Image (cartoon, rainbow, N blue to C red):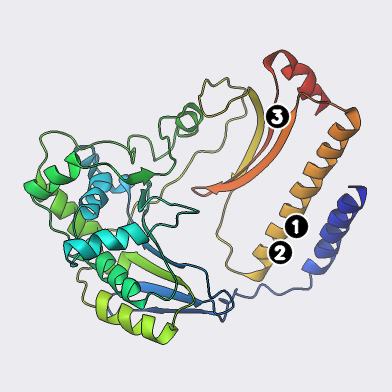
Amino acid sequence: MQGTKIRLLAGGLLMMATAGYVQADALQPDPAWQQGTLSNGLQWQVLTTPQRPSDRVEIRLLVNTGSLAESTQQSGYSHAIPRIALTQSGGLDAAQARSLWQQGIDPKRPMPPVIVSYDTTLFNLSLPNNRNDLLKEALSYLANATGKLTITPETINHALQSQDMVATWPADTKEGWWRYRLKGSTLLGHDPADPLKQPVEAEKIKDFYQKWYTPDAMTLLVVGNVDARSVVDQINKTFGELKGKRETPAPVPTLSPLRAEAVSIMTDAVRQDRLSIMWDTPWQPIRESAALLRYWRADLAREALFWHVQQALSASNSKDIGLGFDCRVLYLRAQCAINIASPNDKLTSNLNLV
């Protein structure tokens, strides 16, 4: 443990010492990633993994739109559209569509078929390896769902009467901590889990779909042991037909800085009382080498801090305390937390120990 801490600190010092001599070069993509843009603006990326021939083929289609694009009258549109898509065959016959979805979810690591958030809609498929027929069907289905969806009063009613397979991020948008975190942000009033308002107007949902589901706002990713040339050809044929162009920039989701205050929040999201010490800073995407080095140094410092506290807790033989360290990027804010899980009657003493 001590050696680990020393190595972490030494590594951090070494990186700090060398950072001044590194040019801020633009980061280059991994050569294994093939990527391109179709004439209609759709971006694609393909990563072939011949070294992992038995892995499933993962397909993701990211649409740059979510509940933040909704007006008050359009509440629920971003959640309803993928619900409608999941009840249609996507250009396949009904038996093919059923078979695709039966095989398109990894039984060991299942993901929701669609996840809707404030700024994105993500379609997920995980296919068995060596099934080129399924891969072709999956691409055809996704192209149809995101560019040729049939939106009528009948298809909307059918979707609303079917099981809702669309998940949201976060999974529980009404959870106490998340509602607190949204205070003062642009995300308030744009809940991706909101239902459609009544009466439902099919033409307005269709207009929303055509406005925001444009190929120049989509990114397709395929990862697996596939023939890259064949997949790229199929992407061109299948998605190259999609029409439309984004005329309105997508709203940018932002969170307010964390306020320097103590709060008490009731939530069902944890099983034991928890004390969290949190801080956050502005976040900028990493696009050049100097920024990447700064991130690595900060990450090493966080890791060293965690091991230091963990070592002190081990030395104290404290049994009623659980320590966690969590860092993540949330809408242009880099947020970190030291989480202390403890019985309520020992929370103060355990906090003092930390």
| Quarter of the view holding residue 212 | bottom left
Disc 2 marks which residue? 293
- Give neighbour class at mark 2: few <14, some 14-19, many 20+ (Cα, 10 Å): some
- Give neighbour class at mark 1: few <14, some 14-19, many 20+ (Cα, 10 Å): many
Q: Quadrant of the C terminus?
A: top right
Q: Nearer the viewer, mark 1 or mark 3?
A: 3
Q: Earlier in the sequence, mark 2 or mark 3?
A: 2
Residue 341 lies, with reference to residue 25, above or below; the image says: above
Furthest toward the top, the residue is 345
In terms of secondary structure, where does tag 2 sit? helix
Residue at 49% across, 53% down = 109
Residue 218 lies, with reference to residue 153, above or below; the image says: below
Q: Position of residue 56 (x, y in %)?
A: 47, 67
Q: Are marks 1 and 2 in contact (CB under 8 Å)?
A: yes
Type of amino acid at the residue the image marks with label 3? Ile
Disc 1 marks which residue? 297
Furthest toward the bottom, the residue is 229
- State the separation of the CA atoms marked 2 and 3: 29 Å
Pick the front one: 44 or 155: 155
Residue 227 visible: yes
In terms of secondary structure, where does tag 3 sit? strand
